Image (tube, rainbow, N blue to C red):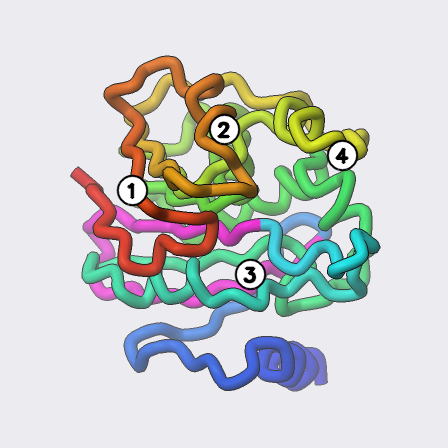
């Protein structure tokens, strides 16, 4: 019954979107949450690319928390499906696609970067990687989730951290827009000392380039994508090397 409920919920939220044939939907139980993933695993010895979803549909047009944070955009799923690496995983955030019993709106609002969320996401990454080297790719708020996973799990074999339109300091970000602080989230991120590449949209009005320049001190790690807004990275040619 539980599996049927999960599949029903996934299908009803995802609408007409369908994964490519070589990806399989795999719910991963990790900490307090069941994490929705799509996985392609064809080489047990090769590294794995793990894409972490953004904040999703956390607030409605009036600024009120939604009842379901499942993303309406398919951007991150589409980037994962286009990836030709032998091992690729799309990983949603807690309560996206699967509404676990522990879910409440704090986990996609002020507690979206809380210890419970990070513990769950860290366990999910560890499980799906299964000891293989990892390239971690985070979009929007998923970038900060990825960075905090790296910071809190130094034993993870991270080969590269890639962010796309990434929030890297939630306190700066909320202050910039005059929004309420994410009071139940972990402290803002200090950039992990790993190989990194940060894609920044020239016209991003959700994570402005001004903030990205403040967060990323090593300009050699930052790629400004001309004419690109927050959700315009669908054709991005990601450098995994």
The answer for how far apart the CA atoms under marks 1 and 2 are is 34 Å
Camera-side mark, 1 or 4 = 1
The answer for how far apart the CA atoms under marks 4 and 2 are is 30 Å
Question: Mark 4 or 2 closer to N-term?
Answer: 2
- Residues at badges 3 and 2 in contact (C-beta under 8 Å)? no
Q: How many labels does the image show?
A: 4
Q: Is mark 2 on a helix, strand or loop?
A: loop
* Horizontal relation, residue 150 to residue 158: left or right: right
Q: What element carries label 4?
A: loop
* Horizontal relation, residue 80 to residue 38: left or right: left
Q: Position of residue 24 (x, y in %)?
A: 40, 74
The answer for how far apart the CA atoms under marks 4 and 3 are is 33 Å
Q: What element carries label 1?
A: loop
Which residue is disc 4 drawn over?
179
Q: Residues within 10 Å of mark 1 (few under 14, many from 20)?
A: few
Which residue is disc 2 drawn over?
153
The answer for how far apart the CA atoms under marks 1 and 3 are is 37 Å
Q: Position of residue 10 (x, y in %)?
A: 60, 77
Which residue is disc 1 drawn over?
226
> Which residue occupies 77% across, 30% down?
181
- Residue 158 visible somewhere in the drawing: no
Camera-side mark, 1 or 3 = 1
Q: Is residue 160 above or below residue 84?
A: above
> Which residue occupies 48% across, 31% down?
147
């Amino acid at each position: 019954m539980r599996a049927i409920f999960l599949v029903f919920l996934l299908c009803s939220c995802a609408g007409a979107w369908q994964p490519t044939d070589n990806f399989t939907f795999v719910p991963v139980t990790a900490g307090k949450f069941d994490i929705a993933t799509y996985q392609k695993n064809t080489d047990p010895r090769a590294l794995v690319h793990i894409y972490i979803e953004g904040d999703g549909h956390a607030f409605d047009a009036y600024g009120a928390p939604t009842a379901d944070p499942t993303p309406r955009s398919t951007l991150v799923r589409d980037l994962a499906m286009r990836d030709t690496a032998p091992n690729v995983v799309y990983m949603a955030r807690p309560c996206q696609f699967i509404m676990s019993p522990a879910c409440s709106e704090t986990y996609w609002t002020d507690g979206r970067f809380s210890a419970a969320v990070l513990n769950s996401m860290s366990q999910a990454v560890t499980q799906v990687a299964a000891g293989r080297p990892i390239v971690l790719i985070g979009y929007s708020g998923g970038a900060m989730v990825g960075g905090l996973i790296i910071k809190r799990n130094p034993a993870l074999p991270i080969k590269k951290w890639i962010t796309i339109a990434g929030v890297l300091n939630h306190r700066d970000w909320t202050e910039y827009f005059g929004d309420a602080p994410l009071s139940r989230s972990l402290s803002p991120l200090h950039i992990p000392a790993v190989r990194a590449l940060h894609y920044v949209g020239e016209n991003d009005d959700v994570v402005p380039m001004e903030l990205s320049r403040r967060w990323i001190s090593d300009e050699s790690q930052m790629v400004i994508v001309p004419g690109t807004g927050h959700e315009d990275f669908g054709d991005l040619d990601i450098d995994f090397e």
